[in-house]
Image (cartoon, rainbow, N blue to C red):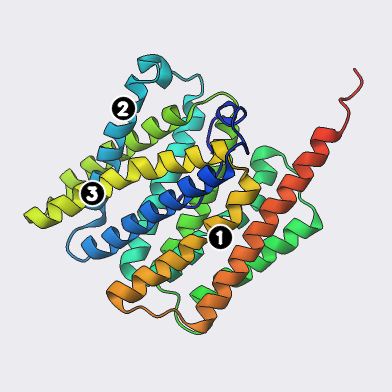
Amino acid sequence: MSTHATKPTNATETVSHLGDRPLLGVTLLMGCLIAMAGISALVKLLGTDYPIQQLLMFRFGIAALIFLCLASRNGGVQALKTRRPFDHAVRTLCGIVSLSAYFYAITEIPIADASAISYAAPIFVVVLSIPFLGERIGLQRWLAVLAGFVGMLLIARPGVMSLEVGYIAAIASALFGAMVVVWLRRLAKTEKTITSGFYYNTTGALLAVGWVLLTGWTTPSATDLALLVLLGLLAGPQQYLLAASFRFAEASMLAPLDYAFLIFAAVIGYVFWGEVPTLITWIGCAIIAASGIFAAYRERVVSGRQKLQPPPVT
């Protein structure tokens, strides 16, 4: 799932405010993480009585309406025009697969485990940036990748127990979430956050509705219907708060704080479902967080060096 913090899809949106109000940026990110924790808790709660496709229908459908309203207030149809439909299609489909896999993982394994493995996405990003973005990766970032995979394997523990489908789904969520990040970087120079968000959520809603029509509808109670609506209502603001946080604070400041979600997830799992993360899980979480933060730091250092290099002589 692409729940972990990534840079907003329109680089030009961040320039004028980047780093100007770091406290506001941190506050917005915390709001995003709280919304993510709420979404995870609702999926865990509702997933025992309703199929994943029905949860996705509410999550995508209501978020699509929110982004449609945002688009109508920010240029209307013009805000939705794009010359890069293929890149949007790849980003959208990868995002849908990532989120679907994450929802399934939450219903099958402890929230802390599913969240920790999904946060290995930045490690996959480093690997995928070589073929898709043409980046060159140094030894230090390769070591961060190796450490991240070790942390992920510690949590999944494939050598100790048979690898459960829920853990496989969490790993798939991280992999496809990394694809989302890579494609957002490809779209960043020309596309707006609203454009990407609208196509992603609208396509997800249409596919989820079709899935529900094929497999059947489970009529929710009044209380559960309210919770399903809340699931969708949290999704739009969560994505908006994530993008907005990077307008006011640098990514290098926000990256370490993003991993606070792992603590939120562990607390929710313990309070509501009595899930107590094992020591191995905490060690795996720490390794994944450290490797992800270091990989982000090295990327920033390398990018800074490239900006300082003189342009080639032509």
Amino acid found under the numbered disc labelled 1: Ala
Q: Is residue 287 above or below residue 6?
A: below
Query: What is the tally of numbered marks visible in this picture?
Result: 3
Q: Nearer the viewer, residue 48 or 15?
A: 15
Mark 1 nearby-residue class (10 Å; few <14, some 14–19, many ≥20): many
Residue 167 visible in the current orientation:
no
> What separation in Å lies between label 1 and label 2 (alpha carbons)?
31 Å
Task: Please tell me which residue is depicted at 30% across the width and 62% down the height of the picture.
Answer: 41
Nearest to the eye among marks 3 and 2: give it: 3
- Three-letter code, disc 2: Leu
Q: Residue at x 65, y 49 (%)?
A: 252
State the SS at label 1. loop
The answer to which quarter of the image holds residue 103 is bottom left
Residue designated by label 2: 68
Identify residue for label 3: 230
Q: Is residue 279 above or below residue 291?
A: below
